[in-house]
Image (cartoon, rainbow, N blue to C red):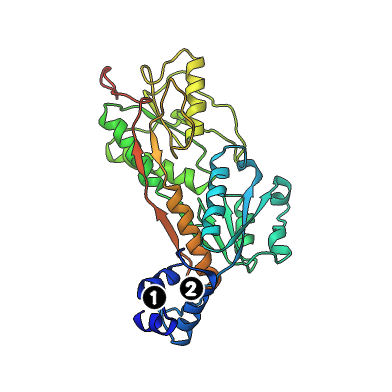
């Protein structure tokens, strides 16, 4: 990097920033550094040549049912646009309607060749996202992944997060614990269920089918929560929105949270009700967005490298929606 910096008239630190796609220099300086690096045959540690592009037009496609005002995905979209702009790129939004998804219509941003790459934020049906990954435009899946590895993906630490939350409830004396979420709809919900499942198995606790409650149908549309007559002492929910819905349903049954039943969420995004601050798992959304932008930039520069899945860690946040269980020993 010193040799590249000497040829470009900049420091080795500036060269490092240019190759990492960091801000702090003009597009002209970055381009000069990358061009010189390519001419000098510089190789990344993985052996690929430096060909990072600048000034990219990146499409951001979001299923319209996820893009509600102040929703988690609208927040993620704003962060994506900001991060792309800081890196000298441009973010272009297209909402994916249910009709276009069902008809497997290619996004207009791709069809009209308006973008260099695509970030698909939020999981549509499998047939649709696999079609996108094979359309020839560099693509990154954000907040979900495909088991066939058909595109780069960036996800939160879903399995570990729910494992931590469930283990915390168990440590606090709970033995009858349910899960709220339809694990068939997204990879994130399935991974969160697996974290719950892992904690229950490792502690030799039974999983009662009637305490696995669906929050949406297989088309990913909200449905009413159907609570069984006999309830567990705690629920692990797949996201904060669902946790809030569950708390409302429990209150309608005359139950208090957390005095009568404990509830945890996931994401740490929801504006918490003042009377029930929600225990949850905080997803590192800034880290996810930064990695997604880095991944799509690198994919636009090198379409031949193997696809990968990047997992971003988070941390549990314990508030007042769950508490110690002090009742009789449960079986």
Looking at the rendered structure, which numbered label has been put on residue 207? none
Q: Nearer the viewer, residue 27 or 283?
A: 27
Q: CA distance from mark 2 to mark 1?
A: 10 Å
Sequence-wise, which precedes: disc 2 or disc 1? Answer: 1
Q: Please, which residue is most extreme toward the front here?
A: 9
Left or right: 210 in relation to 330: right
- Residue located beneath label 1 in the image: 46
Left or right: 120 in relation to 50: right
Residue at image position (54%, 33%) is 215
Inspect this view and state whether residue 302 appears: no
Is 260 drawn above or below residue 313 in the view shown?
above
Left or right: 326 in relation to 154: left
Residue at image position (28%, 23%) is 324
Is 231 drawn above or below residue 206 in the view shown?
above
Left or right: 146 in relation to 235: right
Q: Are marks 2 and 1 in contact (CB under 8 Å)?
A: yes
Residue 264, quarter of the rendered image: top left
How crowded pointer 1 is (Cα within 10 Å; few <14, some 14-19, many 20+) is rated as: few
Looking at the picture, how far across and down is residue 230, in whole percent? 43, 19
Q: Please, which residue is most extreme toward the bottom here?
A: 40
Count of residue discs: 2
- Residue located beneath label 2 in the image: 305
Q: Quadrant of the C terminus?
A: top left
How crowded pointer 2 is (Cα within 10 Å; few <14, some 14-19, many 20+) is rated as: few
Callout 1: SS: loop
Residue 112, quarter of the rendered image: bottom right
């Amino acid at each position: 990097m010193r040799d590249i910096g000497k040829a470009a008239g900049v420091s080795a630190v500036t060269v490092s920033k240019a190759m990492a796609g960091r801000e702090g220099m003009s597009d002209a300086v970055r381009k000069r550094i990358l061009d010189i690096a390519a001419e000098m045959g510089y190789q990344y540690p993985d052996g690929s040549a430096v060909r990072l592009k600048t000034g990219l037009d990146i499409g951001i496609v979001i299923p319209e049912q996820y893009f509600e005002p102040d929703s988690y995905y609208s927040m993620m979209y704003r962060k994506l646009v900001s991060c792309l702009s800081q890196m000298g790129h441009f973010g272009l939004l297209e909402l994916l309607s249910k009709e276009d998804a069902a008809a497997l219509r290619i996004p207009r941003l791709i069809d009209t060749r308006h973008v260099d790459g695509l970030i698909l934020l939020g999981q549509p049906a499998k047939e649709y996202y696999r079609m996108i990954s094979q359309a020839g435009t560099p693509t990154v899946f954000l907040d979900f992944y495909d088991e066939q590895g058909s595109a780069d993906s960036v996800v939160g630490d879903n399995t570990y997060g729910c494992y931590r939350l469930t283990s915390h409830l168990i440590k606090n004396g709970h033995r009858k614990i349910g899960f709220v979420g339809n694990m068939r709809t997204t990879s994130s919900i399935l991974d969160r269920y697996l974290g719950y499942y892992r904690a229950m198995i490792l502690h030799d606790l039974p999983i009662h089918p009637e305490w696995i409650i669906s929050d949406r149908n297989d088309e990913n549309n909200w449905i009413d929560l159907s609570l069984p007559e006999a309830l567990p002492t705690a629920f692990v929910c797949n996201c904060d929105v669902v946790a809030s819905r569950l708390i409302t349903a429990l209150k309608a049954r005359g139950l208090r949270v957390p005095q009568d039943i404990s509830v945890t969420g996931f994401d740490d995004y929801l504006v918490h009700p003042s009377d029930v601050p929600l225990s949850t798992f905080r997803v590192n959304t800034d880290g996810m967005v930064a990695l997604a932008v880095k991944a799509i930039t690198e994919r636009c520069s090198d379409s031949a490298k193997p696809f990968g899945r990047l997992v971003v860690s988070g941390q549990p946040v314990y508030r007042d929606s769950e508490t110690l269980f002090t009742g009789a020993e449960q079986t």
